[in-house]
Amino acid sequence: MARTKKKPEQTNIPGTEPPRIPEVDAAASAYLSIRDDRRALLEDQREAKRKLVEAMKKSGQLVYRNVDENILVTLETEDKVKVKREKDASDDDGDEE
């Protein structure tokens, strides 16, 4: 499939720029900062999950319990784990990858 050339961005005629709204600019900047932080954390979470799957495979365990910290880890498929606190067995990380 051939790529289409990207058209150059149209510039404003001097004096016809859209008005700046400082409140919207500040809110948008705050939102973008939080979104970028969340995305970085998501990458960290994925890496931690990958390491957990590796550790479970290496140990040969399908189910692992840590009673001191009330953690239950279940290796469900080759690359998928569930981690939850045992006190609330219905709570799940909700991250299905």
Image: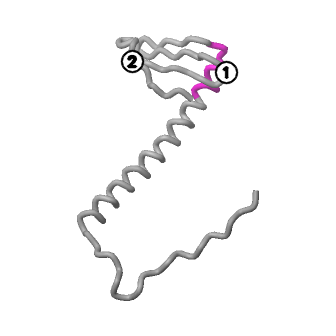
CA–CA distance in space, label 1 to label 2: 22 Å
Mark 2 sits on what residue? 91
Q: Nearer the viewer, residue 51 or 20?
A: 20
Examine the image and state in which quarter residue 20 appears: bottom left
Residue 69 in view: no
Q: Which amino acid does label 1 sit on?
A: Glu
Q: Residues within 10 Å of mark 2 (few under 14, many from 20)?
A: few
- List x then y, in percent, for residue 10: 50, 78
Q: Which residue is drawn at 39% across and 13% down?
A: 90
Q: Which residue extends farthest left?
A: 23
Q: Is residue 74 left or right of residue 30?
A: right
Examine the image and state in which quarter residue 6 appears: bottom right
Query: Which colour scheme appears in the figure?
Result: one colour
Q: In this view, does 58 lie to the left or right of 97?
A: right
The reply to whether the magenta stretch includes residue 43 is no
Q: Which of 11 and 51 is in front in this view?
A: 11
Res. 78 mark = 1
Tell me which segment is drawn in magenta: 52-61
Q: Nearer the viewer, residue 44 or 59?
A: 44
The number of numbered discs placed on residues in the rendered structure image is: 2
Find out whether the residues at labels 1 and 2 contact each other: C-beta distance under 8 Å: no
Residue 39 in view: yes
Does residue 42 lie above or below 84 as drawn?
below
Q: In which quarter of the image is the N terminus?
A: bottom right
Q: Which residue extends farthest bottom?
A: 14
Q: Quadrant of the C terminus?
A: top right
Q: Is the magenta stretch mostly helix, strand or loop?
A: helix
